[in-house]
Amino acid sequence: MKNLGIIVISFFITLQVLGQNSEKAKLLLDTVATKMEGYENMEIKFSQTLVNEDVGINEGDEPPIIGEITLQQEKYNLDYLGNTFLFNGFTMYVINEEEKEVTVSKGDIDGEDGFIYPSKLATFYKEGYTYAMGKIKQKNGRNLQFVNLFPIDNASNIVKVELAIDLKMNHIYQLIQTGENGSKTTFTITTFKPNQKLSESLFSFDTIKYSEKNGYTID
């Protein structure tokens, strides 16, 4: 009975520590989200790398994909994989300049594929995840606190997300997403500029430029 009592006490202590760890992680994430959402706008340049050793894609095998996004509240202009994703708060325009195609849809980027897009960087954790504080690491002159996030949905394509938070700035520096297929996608913020002077037309779709008259197909 004595040993059983020790086991029970140890179990509840473990639960308490895990709970405190989770609360600390959420507090840090909330602090970062509040700061990043508090800016009038943000200009972010990022790089993306993919590693999947199971299919022979190792670190350094492929050059990083470079992207850029400007966010203002719920609006954004995202340049990614050769496409421009333009969201004005109500309608999404995906513009492929090379193919001269424009896809129009209502609402934001659909996240049902399990992928975390840069436009969701500061807020995606708020629904569907549990949290745990990770290690503190030094990287590129930054003091980074890692936070581990795990999807609540067992059917999610995501196994784990790691957020590296710059403790000096309270900004997200890196997002590492591990998929169920063994792939690891890493987003690294290379440039961060808040509160910039933006063009009034940055989040507006130019109906004349992308008209069928100018050779574009609009779907």
Image (cartoon, helix red, strand yellow):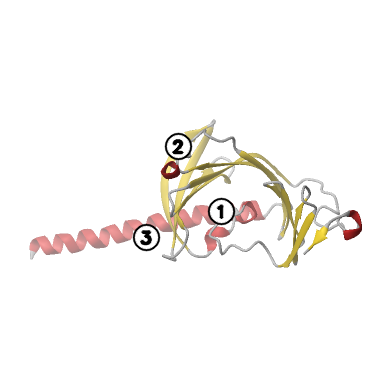
Q: Earlier in the sequence, mark 3 or mark 1?
A: 3
Residue labelled with disc 3 = 19
Q: Which mark is residue 131?
A: none
The x, y position of residue 150, in whole percent, is: 43, 57
Q: CA distance from mark 3 to mark 1?
A: 18 Å
The image quadrant that residue 91 belongs to is: bottom right
Q: Which mark is residue 137?
A: 2
SS for callout 3:
helix
Residue 116 vs residue 70: left or right?
left
Residue labelled with disc 1 = 31
Q: Is residue 100 above or below residue 193?
A: below
On the question of residue 172 being in view, the answer is yes
Residue found at the very far left of the displayed protein: 1
Counting other residues with Cα less than 10 Å from the Cα at mark 3, is it few (<14), some (14-19), or many (20 or more)?
A: some
The x, y position of residue 61, in whole percent, is: 52, 34
Q: Which label sits in the foreground, 1 or 2?
A: 2
Residue at image x 75%, y 47%?
195
On the question of residue 89 being in view, the answer is no
Q: CA distance from mark 2 to mark 3?
A: 23 Å
Q: Nearer the viewer, residue 33 or 139?
A: 139
